[in-house]
Image (tube, rainbow, N blue to C red):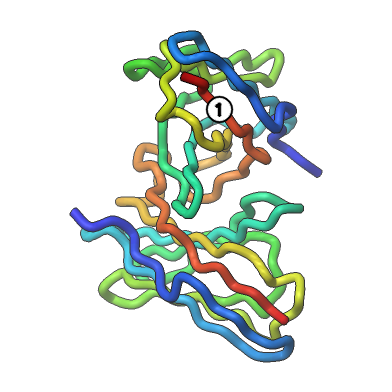
Amino acid sequence: DQQVKQNSPSLSVQEGRISILNCDYTNSMFDYFLWYKKYPAEGPTFLISISSIKDKNEDGRFTVFLNKSAKHLSLHIVPSQPGDSAVYFCAASAGTSGSRLTFGEGTQLTVNP
Amino acid sequence: KAGVTQTPRYLIKTRGQQVTLSCSPISGHRSVSWYQQTPGQGLQFLFEYFSETQRNKGNFPGRFSGRQFSNSRSEMNVSTLELGDSALYLCASSLSGQKSSPLHFGNGTRLTVT
């Protein structure tokens, strides 16, 4: 039972354009969502998070949007840079624990120069 | 500040053997979590330790165990290895394990079971 799904295994965009990565979840108990970025041979790196009491959170070029009624969140990267090329994981947690995360399968983002 | 350090980076074991993986968290971080990453199942939570106590446990068999020492360093052990245990094992640390302190991952230990 995949509670967090990233339906696009890959995404390719041009440098300078917007990258939009999507994530859907099924568990209504999830109340905290995160995005991680992973380069080959490295562990995931935290990017940005959002609590279920908000619908948007921004950090520099990265913005996460949360639509609770649709159980959908998205990560926008503007402008996209070649260094953003990596696998992006959506993750969610419920209750008080910030360590027990449920991850999506990941989306490989390629930003072409 | 040094990141999360996992040793060894690579490991090859035979079915039936046991293995111990080690993790040194970021200095000052008291929570250590372990995840398994496989191509079929993705990243899955194994367990979390805080102040030497297991605080959360994922849906893995009892062959998977761990512990945390007083200096917050952690080890995980897998006994009676099976071929399906071949995976990347990631350790992550955080200040408190609460939602306000995100996980910082190490580069993982790649375990191959033959």
Q: Position of residue A45 (x, y in %)?
A: 41, 42
In the foreground, A47 or A93: A47
Q: As drawn, is A54 to the left or to the right of B72?
A: right
Q: Position of residue A38 (x, y in %)?
A: 49, 42
Subunit that carries the residue with mark 1: A
Residue drawn 48% across the image and 62% down it = B108
Q: Residue furthest front?
A: A113
Q: Residue furthest right?
A: A1
Q: Position of residue A26 (x, y in %)?
A: 74, 30
In the foreground, A56 or A51: A56
Above or below residue A42? Residue B32 is below
Q: Is residue A40 visible?
A: yes
Q: Position of residue A78 (x, y in %)?
A: 43, 12
Q: As drawn, is B64 to the left or to the right of B98?
A: right
Q: Is residue A54 visible?
A: no
Q: Residue furthest bottom?
A: B17
* Quarter that holds the C terminus of chain B: bottom right
Badge 1 crowding class, 10 Å Cα cut-off, few under 14, some 14 to 19, many 20 or more, is: many
Q: As drawn, is B62 to the left or to the right of B95?
A: right
Q: In which image quadrant can residue A58 be found?
A: top left
Above or below residue A40? Residue B9 is below
Q: As drawn, is A66 to the left or to the right of A28?
A: left
In the foreground, A14 or B14: A14
Q: Residue furthest left?
A: B1
Tally the numbered discs.
Answer: 1
Task: Tell me the residue that label 1 is attached to.
Answer: A110
Residue drawn 70% across the image and 61% down it = B59
Residue drawn 69% across the image and 35% down it = A4
